[in-house]
Image (spheres, rainbow, N blue to C red):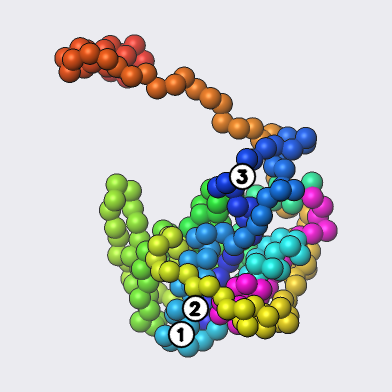
C-alpha cells in the first residue's frame, strides 16, 4: 500500500498576535514559530498506521521554501519513508504568499502523478488560510475519487470504506475504489511523537527537491493577486435584552422585523 501525504508548514498563531506587514499583503512572521499543520499531522499518523497494518510506503510531500525541510524531516522521524519538497523559493518572498490553492494543487498533482500510489491523504483544512480546497482539487486534477472530512478509514483493497462528517452532526459512509484521496479530520487518531533517535536519523535522510519550473509551469501561472489583508472589522456588540419572557420576546420580534428578516 503506497501512501502519499501532503503536509504544510504553518505558523502557530493561537498564542501570538497577528499583524499585517507594511505591504498589506502578508503577515509579520519574524516572531512566529512554525510547525506541521494540525490536520496534516493527523493525516500523517493515519498513513503510518495503515502502513504498519498493511505494509507499503509513506511519502510526505510539501510545497515551499527550504524552511519546509524541518517539517518534512519530522514526518520522516515519525515514520514516513521518503520526503519530497516542491521548491518555490526562487519565486521570491513577494510571490510565494500569493500562490493560491489551485496553483498549489496543480504543483502537487504534477509531482504526485510521477509516483506510484494507492492512497493520498491530506489534512481537511490549513490553519493559516482555512480554505479546505487543496485536497479536493488534487483529486479532481488526478481524476481519482475522494472523500472529505474523513473520521475513519478501513482498507479492504481494492476498496476503502470511509466515514466522513456532514453538516448538522450527520455522518456518511462511503465505499471508494482505490486509488483515492481522503482529507483527514482532526481526532481520527492520536498523532505520535518522534523519538530523539528517530529525529537524529531523519536529519541525515535525503529530501528530494523538485523545482517548480521542472513541473512544466510558468511563474505567471503561479501568480494570484492579493489586493490586501486586514483584520475583521469590529461590528456592533451583542445586545442583552432585559425584562420578562414576554417583554424580551416582543423586543426580539421587533428587532427581527426591523432587520427585514420576517
Q: Is residue 50 above or below residue 96?
A: below
Percent x, y of residue 123: 51, 61
Dot 2: what SS?
helix
Residue at screen point 58% across, 66% down: 6
Task: Compute the Cα span from label 2 to label 3.
Answer: 31 Å
Q: Is residue 89 magenta?
A: yes
Which residue carries the number 3 mark? 16
Magenta extent? 73-93
Q: Residues within 10 Å of mark 1 (few under 14, many from 20)?
A: few
Which residue lies at the image location 78% right of the left edge and 35% below the top edge? 22
Reply yes or no: does residue 259 show up in magenta: no
Residue 262 visible to the viewer: yes
Disc 2 residue crowd, few under 14, some 14–19, many 20+, Cα 10 Å: many
User: Where is residue 250, by image quadrant?
Assistant: top left
Task: Point out the tag, 2 or 3, that comes first from the N-terminus.
Answer: 3
Q: Residue at x 78, y 67 (%)?
A: 211
Question: Of all residues shown, which one is farthest toward the left?
Answer: 246
Q: Are marks 1 and 2 in contact (CB under 8 Å)?
A: yes
The residue lying at 65 percent from left, 67 percent from top is 71
Q: Point out residue 203 in the picture as x, y percentages from the top left corner.
A: 71, 78
In the rendering, which numbered label is found on residue 48?
2
Amino acid at each position: 500500500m503506497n501512501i502519499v501525504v501532503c503536509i504544510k508548514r504553518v505558523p502557530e498563531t493561537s498564542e501570538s498576535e497577528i499583524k499585517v506587514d507594511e505591504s498589506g499583503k502578508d503577515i509579520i512572521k519574524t516572531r512566529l514559530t512554525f510547525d506541521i499543520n494540525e490536520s496534516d499531522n493527523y493525516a500523517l499518523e493515519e498513513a503510518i498506521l495503515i502502513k504498519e497494518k498493511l505494509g507499503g510506503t509513506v511519502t510526505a510531500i510539501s510545497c515551499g521554501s527550504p524552511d519546509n525541510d524541518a517539517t518534512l524531516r519530522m514526518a520522516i522521524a515519525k515514520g514516513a519513508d521518503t520526503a519530497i519538497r516542491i521548491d518555490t523559493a526562487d519565486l521570491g518572498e513577494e510571490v510565494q504568499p500569493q500562490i493560491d490553492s489551485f496553483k498549489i494543487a496543480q504543483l502537487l498533482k504534477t509531482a504526485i502523478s510521477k509516483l506510484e500510489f494507492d492512497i493520498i491523504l491530506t489534512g481537511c483544512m490549513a490553519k493559516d488560510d482555512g480554505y479546505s480546497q487543496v485536497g479536493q482539487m488534487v483529486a479532481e486534477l488526478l481524476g481519482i475519487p475522494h472523500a472529505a472530512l474523513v473520521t475513519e478509514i478501513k482498507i479492504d483493497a481494492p476498496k476503502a470504506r470511509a466515514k466522513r462528517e456532514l453538516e448538522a452532526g450527520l455522518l456518511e459512509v462511503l465505499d471508494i475504489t482505490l486509488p483515492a484521496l481522503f482529507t483527514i479530520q482532526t481526532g481520527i487518531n492520536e498523532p505520535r511523537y518522534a523519538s530523539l533517535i528517530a529525529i537524529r536519523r531523519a536529519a541525515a535522510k535525503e529530501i528530494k527537491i523538485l523545482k517548480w519550473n521542472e513541473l512544466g509551469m510558468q511563474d505567471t501561472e503561479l501568480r494570484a493577486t492579493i489586493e490586501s489583508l486586514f483584520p475583521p472589522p469590529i461590528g456592533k456588540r451583542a445586545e442583552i435584552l432585559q425584562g420578562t419572557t414576554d417583554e424580551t420576546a416582543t423586543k426580539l420580534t421587533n428587532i427581527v422585523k426591523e432587520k427585514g428578516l420576517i
